[in-house]
Image (cartoon, rainbow, N blue to C red):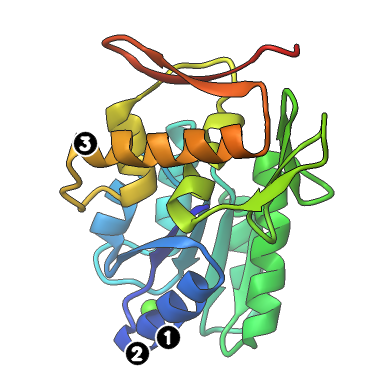
Amino acid sequence: MRLLLVEDEKRMAQALCEILRLEKYEVDHATDGISGLDAVESDIYDIIILDVMLPGMDGFEIVKRARQKGIRTPILMLTAKSELDDKIIGLDSGADDYLTKPFITKELLARLRALGRRNINTPDGTLTFGDITLDTGTSMLSCSANGQSVRLSEKEYHILEYLIANQGQILTREQLAVKIWGIESDVEYNNVEVYMSFTRKKLAFVGAETEIKAVRGIGYELRCGRV
Ligand code: CA
């Protein structure tokens, strides 16, 4: 899952990025309101953590503008203030949840899991397509037809997660590169092909009839022979 953190406090942001990456989130970090809004409006994130007090533009304004533009990504607001008024403004502006600093990590992670489930709509923590099931907690890929399973690497997991979340659509190499490697990374498109091939091998390993089909000149799509 790709997560955006908009937070200007350096130490806080560094600590959060580390924790979130350990939890297997792909994390991008914006340090002020203006670059934060830009990143939010790129609409490539699954969850956004947004600090309220930011240089350039505050978190409330960012949420308001993003929602006006039709960005529906779940947003968790963070603030150092504990006043109830802030909470009300935050929720009114279109934020989905609210956490007051200082908070404990466990609490943050629990809120993120809840928002992540809301986003991809998987109450039991799994994603399914055709004959495959992806466990969002353990990164295990399994085939429902024969019970075979295998653990995916981080990139393989993100590729399949993204393809399943967008089933029925063709995803371009550019979309995949941005989603899996991030806006600022200068990943070669060859990398996408290399990881596609790894991911296909895992699908073959579990005996799945679900395949990643290359659509010439456009991109990739998930298809299943069993359905
Ligand atoms: Ca701040």
Amino acid on which the number 1 mark rests in the picture: Ala
* Looking at the image, residue 188 lies above or below residue 39: above
How far apart in space, not on screen, are marks 1 and 2 (Cα)? Answer: 6 Å
Q: Secondary structure at mark 3?
A: helix
Query: Looking at the image, in which quadrant does ligand 1 appear?
Result: bottom left
The percent coordinates of residue 146 (x first, y second) are: 82, 34
Residue that carries the numbered disc 2 in the rendered image:
11
Marks 1,2: beta carbons within 8 A? yes
Residue contact between numbered discs 2 and 3, judged by CB atoms under 8 Å: no
| Residue occupied by mark 1 | 15
Residue at (34% x, 71% y) in the render = 54
Which residue is found at the position 59% from the left and 71% from the top?
A: 86
Q: Marks 1/3: CA distance?
A: 32 Å
**Beta carbon of the mark 3 residue lies under 8 A of ligand 1:** no
Numbered disc in front, either 1 or 2: 1
Q: Position of residue 143 (x, y in %)?
A: 75, 36
Q: Is residue 46 visible?
A: no
Residue 221 appears left or right of 82: left
Q: Which residue is tagged 3?
A: 190
Dot 1, crowdedness within 10 Å: few (<14), some or many (≥20)?
A: few
Report if the CB atoms under discs 1 and 3 are less than 8 Å apart: no
Relative to the observer, which residue lies in front, 211 or 178?
211
- Residue in the picture at 59% in, 49% down: 74
The first of marks 1 and 3 along the sequence is 1
What kind of residue is marked 2? Answer: Arg
